[in-house]
Amino acid sequence: MKNPVVTPEGFAYEKANIKKHLTKNGPTDPLSRNELHSGQLIDNHALKQAIDGFRTHNPWAFDFLQPNERFEDVIIS
């Protein structure tokens, strides 16, 4: 995750992916199946900080990438 957001119900999603889901499937949370609109998404700064810290202190976790690949391109397809 690079830009985590949280829903009113507390579920965390990657911002780009949940917005794509809402556009494609309508205003429905994929986990709870309750109504969800993009305006209800809140940036999750604490989770972003934790993820960024992990990436900084654990570069080995991304060693599987080839020099011309980006993490987002491999994971999000």
Image (tube, rainbow, N blue to C red):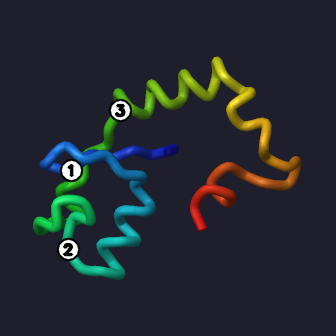
Q: Is residue 49 above or below residue 29?
A: above
| Distance between mark 2 and mark 1 Cα atoms | 12 Å
Report the amino acid beneath label 3: His
Q: Nearer the viewer, mark 1 or mark 3?
A: 1
Q: Residue at x 35, y 81 (%)?
A: 24
Label 3: element kind: helix
Report the amino acid beneath label 2: Pro
Residue beneath disc 1? 7
Q: Is residue 30 above or below residue 43?
A: below
| Distance between mark 3 and mark 2 Cα atoms | 24 Å
Residue beneath disc 2? 27
In terms of depth relative to the viewer, which is nearer, 28 or 37? 28
Quick one: label 1, few (<14), some, or many (20+) residues within 10 Å? Answer: some
Report the amino acid beneath label 1: Thr
Residue beneath disc 3? 45
Disc with the residue nearer the chain's start (3 vs 2):
2
Disc with the residue nearer the chain's start (1 vs 3):
1
Residue 33 x/y as whole percent: 16, 67
